Amino acid sequence: MTSEGYWVNNENIVFKNAIKPCKICGFCPYGQLVEEFPLDPPSRKMAIEHNKYMIKALAEGKFNDQENMTREDAEAEIKNFNKDDYPVKATYNKMTCEVFGHHCPVYYHAELLAEDGDATKEEIDAFDKEIKEYMDELKEDVEKEKVK
């Protein structure tokens, strides 16, 4: 269990030199699970800009009806902000995902066993078809949002 009560190791690095699976298979196999893994801290400049945004957004009432962050959460974040908690320059390391920004779960959960053999043409074709259908649905959703 993590400190938040989840059964995911997102605190103890198991393999420092693991190879990110996306570099082998061409996509992130972790999906939304990646959201449970650490982010590298932003630079001091980015943190200060974010804090200024929070102050402005709070003044505009943006946190009055938010699901993810309440007004009280925003006020606490602003109150507890300390620029010295952030590095002058952003630090990114090889564990950081260049797409999602979180540490890749492989460094915390790599398994040393895998199935034998390569994917069959049928498996590859079926997955390619599924990806295309998924992307088409996303495009439709984006177009619907543009119309609103």
Image: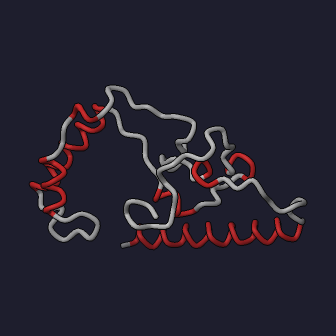
Position of residue 89 measured from the top left corner of the image (x, y, whole percent): 37, 26
Determine whether, in the image, residue 16 is placed left or right of residue 3: right
Residue drawn at the location 57% of the way across and 62% of the way down: 31
Q: Point out residue 133 in the picture as x, y percentages from the top left corner.
A: 66, 72
How many callouts does the rendering have?
Answer: 0
Q: In this view, does 108 lie above or below 139?
A: above
Depth order, front residue of 97/131: 97
Percent x, y of residue 115: 83, 62
**Residue 87 placed where, x, y %?**
33, 30
Report the front residue among 114 and 49. Answer: 114
Q: Looking at the picture, does residue 35 appear above or below residue 50?
A: below
Residue 90 in the figure: left or right of residue 78? right
The quadrant in which residue 28 appears is bottom right
In the image, is 67 to the left or to the right of 123? left
User: Can you name the residue that lies furthest to the left here?
Assistant: 59
Residue at the image position 50 percent from the left and 50 percent from the top: 100
